[in-house]
Image: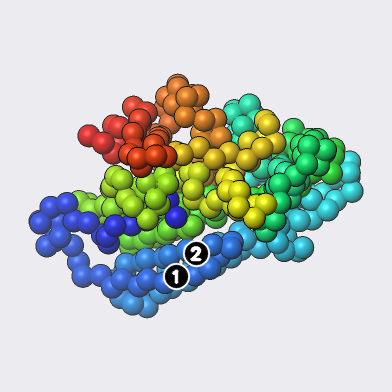
Amino acid sequence: MMLFTSGIFLCLTVAACESSPPTVRVERTVVLMGTTARFVTEGPDRETSVRQLERMVRVIEKTEASLSTWRNTSVLSALNQQPIGTSITLPDDVCALLDRVASWHRETKGVFDPAVGRLIDAWALHDGSSSPDPATLAEAKALSGFHHVTLDAERCAASRRVDLRIDAGGFGKGAALERVRLSESSRPGAWFINFGGQVVVSSASAGSAWPVAIAHPIFRETPVIEIFLEEGSVATTGGSERDIVIDANTRIGHVIDPRTGSTVSYPSSVTVWHQDALVADILSTALYVMGPDDALPWAEARGIAAYFLKANVETGETAHEATLAFTTKFLR
């Protein structure tokens, strides 16, 4: 994981700590969407904290049931299996989600593209077996691209123009966490979730924040910087987060650049903060794919809070850059 908490609730002033009412903390680690999710809830009593934690787990489980391509019964699997040119009616929540996904696909000019399932298969990213030959890669690239999806958001209908496969890897966690954030936004109590490296928290109570460490791009168990999160979500995408070994000893990145059809593995990472967990997830992926030189000006021009870490592969030394929005929020 590229992000992890370096502590529990941080009281920034002694007075704030002393004036806060007693709370009961409940923690649980659950495997969801193929990764580990750590939940922390704090409430006036254990029963309240447990109920809140269980509600949040159920929201993510429901999202997984809709989006997981490992489940033949999911909405995404149904769309991926639908005959070419034949529309499928989508549930309202999935329709709204895919409409937002399509919007970011357009905004990034295709750099963010979840319709890369065929390329994921070609590169054997799920089993790490072997790299594709040029013909296989060309065929997979031709069967990829969200621009081949027809989405009628008003009718909540979608179809595919080619035999592509949408994969939720670039937005599924963010979608689940955003649903949790919205469902719990009006409820009392403090809570925190670290979902496979993406963190989302409740709005912090007065004088408190959650400490979150951003890891070294290569040595991911080594923290480089600590930020204090009072609201929203931070997501990090990096080259060594989930590297894959293919052809026995070749290490490649787990992120696909849809423009080239190849995997991306920079010795760097991109961390994005956004109030909306879905946006944080999407943009951390998109900015990483853009590459260190193009991503910073793109994010800066749009007021995105982004932090870029680059590592020297020989010495391990790191250098960082941040947008004004990130600097203003976390580094001053």
Question: Judging from the image, what secondary structure is the residue with disc 1 in?
Answer: strand
Quarter of the image where one finds residue 146: top right
Against 210, is 293 above or below? above
Disc 1 residue type (three-letter)? Thr
Closer to the camera in the image, 300 or 260: 260
From the top left corner, tell me how far across and down residue 288 is, in percent: 51, 36
Closer to the camera in the image, 133 or 88: 133
Question: Judging from the image, what secondary structure is the residue with disc 2 in?
Answer: strand
Q: Which residue is mark 1?
A: 29
Residue contact between numbered discs 1 and 2, judged by CB atoms under 8 Å: yes
Q: In the figure, is residue 214 to the left or right of 255? A: left
Residue under the point 50% across and 54% down? 177
Residue under the point 51% across and 33% down? 287
Q: Which residue is mark 2?
A: 36
From the top left corner, tell me how far across and down residue 209 is, in percent: 26, 52
Q: In the figure, is residue 192 to the left or right of 208? A: right
- Looking at the image, can residue 183 be seen? no
